[in-house]
């Protein structure tokens, strides 16, 4: 069968590889960068992700794929460190002892926070957390004072005005991920990164796709229509000729999918529309010296215009970048937030005055380059009781499938889960096609 895949992120590339390995004739269209949200750009004779990226030790699907496409030995597991910025100072936050010293909340609240976290690490039945918001559950468990200053601040940072509507299952998933990612609770956390950036696995995956016969077209699609005989017609944005395929798999965000596909039945559209996305704007600074000694700094101070400072070169050796330092200043926001449409220079200008709060010695002369990247569909905002409302991968239109980050649940989106999604959706399509040919006369 001929199969068209829309989108060359991890989900699309993985699915394309699997479908071609099963003998199908696969064409993949990618509008922007192969690698999607995990794509990279050139810095200091190497590559760096447009959005900060690392893996957890529980990310077994992507680790297995890396082995399969020949770059397993490039996946490094390195110690990392986390900090918490509140009341104008950085608190290290790398385990129970640091938590007990978290001076931005009273001691009794620190103990309570530790107990609540330890409790959540033990919970396996996540279903009960689908019907209660994280705001409500955590306020009750921690008390308002501790919640506002710690986990509430983190929810506000990630979800903006949606922060009090996020189901507890999302927060549970975060705790669960960090727990299963550690070999033992006392282990220092190690995170994964590809030596040479995520481009290493993207390139290897693209090569594996080509070897398996996938045709990769570097153009977006402007639409897909279904001919009376059921064949799908894929129309490229660059005006080149339409391609006819038997099956289409879309891995683009749901809002883009709805623009590309023919009108869909109202109940399916309702499911797609039940979930919106937070957008992200990420500024990257290249510095001639470190900003701090922390890799991952959560900002719990509403006066700062960014909510995360991720100093990549406190995780990966700066020697790999000719000694240069790379710092991501991250902010999630509603897509109508002014920052999403501000120019890159305006964003940098808005952020710079706040860096001296992180390091009082900071001087703009340390900056040797800057970049700003934006993503509209950065973070799915999961609604309550989502397990009852997830849009089916099999859309109501025959031979049209959807596999995107909104269908990753109860885990949060991530490259590992897009690889798993790519594997699963390819298996589903293959099994549907085999079922049909077996029942054909
Ligand atoms: C700020 C940020 C930080 C992150 N940090 C991490 C991290 O540390 N670790 C981690 O594992 N994950 C992280 N992620 C998440 C991870 O990158 C994504 O979940 C994953 O890459 C999504 O892959 P995907 O293939 O499902 O979707 P995407 O990567 O979004 O791929 C969809 C592709 O479709 C293409 N497309 C869109 N429209 C069209 C069209 N009309 N025609 C053809 N193609 C089209 C897009 O260009 C894109 O390449 C982060 C994401 C963000 C935004």
Image (spheres, rainbow, N blue to C red):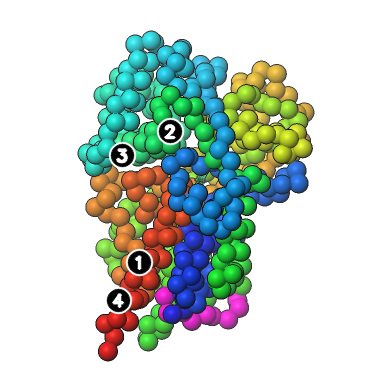
Whether residue 339 is visible to the viewer of this picture, yes or no, is no
Q: Which residue is mark 4?
A: 435
Q: Could you tell me residue 2's position as x and y percent?
A: 46, 78
Could you tell me which residue is drawn at 29 percent across and 26 percent down?
119
Q: Label 1, label 2: how many angstroms apart (C-alpha)?
A: 33 Å
Q: Which residue is mark 1?
A: 428
Whether residue 159 is visible to the viewer of this picture, yes or no, is yes
In the image: residue 399, left or right of residue 214: left
Q: Label 4, label 1: how many angstroms apart (C-alpha)?
A: 10 Å
Secondary structure category for the residue under label 1: helix
- Earlier in the chain: of badge 1 and badge 3, it is 3
Could you tell me which residue is drawn at 67 percent across and 34 percent down?
317
Q: Could you tell me residue 140's position as x and y percent?
A: 26, 24
Q: Label 1, label 3: how many angstroms apart (C-alpha)?
A: 26 Å
- Alpha-carbon neighbours of circle 2 within 10 Å: few (<14), some, or many (≥20)? few
- Earlier in the chain: of badge 1 and badge 2, it is 2
- Earlier in the chain: of badge 4 and badge 2, it is 2
Q: Label 4, label 2: how many angstroms apart (C-alpha)?
A: 41 Å
Q: Which residues are drawn in magenta?
A: 239-247
Q: Is residue 276 above or below residue 170?
A: below
**In the picture, which quadrant includes the N terminus?**
bottom left
Front position among marks 4 and 2: 2
Q: Which residue is mark 2?
A: 183
Residue nearer the viewer, 31 or 255: 31
Q: Label 3, label 4: how many angstroms apart (C-alpha)?
A: 35 Å
- Earlier in the chain: of badge 4 and badge 1, it is 1
Q: Which mark is residue 169?
A: 3
Front position among marks 3 and 4: 4
């Amino acid at each position: 069968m001929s199969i068209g895949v829309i989108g060359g992120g991890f989900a699309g590339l993985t699915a394309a590889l699997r479908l071609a390995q099963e003998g199908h004739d696969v064409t993949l269209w990618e509008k922007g960068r192969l690698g999607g949200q995990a794509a990279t750009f050139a810095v200091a004779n190497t590559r760096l992700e447009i959005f900060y990226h690392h893996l957890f030790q529980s990310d077994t699907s992507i680790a297995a794929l890396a082995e399969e496409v020949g770059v397993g030995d490039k996946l490094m597991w390195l110690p990392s460190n986390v900090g918490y910025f509140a009341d104008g100072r950085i608190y290290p936050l790398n385990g129970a002892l640091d938590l007990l010293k978290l001076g931005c909340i009273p001691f009794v609240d620190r103990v309570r926070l530790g107990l609540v976290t330890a409790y959540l690490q033990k919970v396996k039945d996540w279903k009960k957390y689908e019907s209660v918001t994280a705001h409500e559950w955590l306020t009750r468990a921690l008390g308002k004072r501790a919640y506002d200053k710690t986990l509430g601040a983190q929810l506000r940072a990630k979800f903006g005005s949606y922060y009090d509507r996020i189901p507890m299952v999302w927060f549970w998933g975060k705790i669960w991920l960090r727990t299963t990612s550690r070999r033992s609770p006392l282990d220092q956390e190690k995170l994964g990164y590809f030596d040479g950036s995520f481009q290493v696995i993207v390139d290897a995956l693209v090569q594996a796709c080509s070897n398996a016969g996938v045709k990769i077209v570097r153009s977006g699609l402007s639409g897909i229509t279904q001919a009376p005989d059921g064949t799908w017609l894929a129309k490229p944005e660059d005006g080149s000729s339409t391609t006819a395929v038997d099956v289409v798999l879309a891995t683009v965000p749901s809002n883009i999918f709805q623009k590309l596909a023919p009108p869909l039945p109202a109940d399916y559209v309702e499911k797609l529309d039940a979930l919106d996305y937070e957008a992200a704007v990420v500024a990257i600074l290249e510095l001639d010296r470190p900003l701090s000694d922390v890799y991952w700094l959560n900002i719990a101070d509403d006066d700062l215009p960014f909510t995360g400072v991720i100093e990549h070169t406190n995780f990966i050796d700066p020697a790999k970048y000719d000694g240069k330092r790379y710092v991501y200043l991250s902010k999630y926001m509603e897509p109508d937030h002014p920052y999403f449409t501000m120019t890159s220079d305006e964003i940098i200008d808005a952020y710079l005055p706040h860096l001296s709060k992180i390091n009082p010695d900071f001087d703009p002369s340390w900056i040797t380059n800057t970049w700003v990247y934006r993503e509209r569909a950065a973070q799915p905002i999961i609604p309550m009781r989502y397990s009852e409302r997830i849009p089916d991968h099999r859309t109501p239109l025959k031979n049209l499938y959807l596999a995107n980050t909104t269908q990753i649940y109860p885990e949060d989106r991530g490259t590992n889960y897009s690889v798993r999604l790519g594997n699963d959706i390819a298996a589903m399509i293959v099994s549907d096609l085999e079922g049909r040919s077996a029942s054909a006369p």
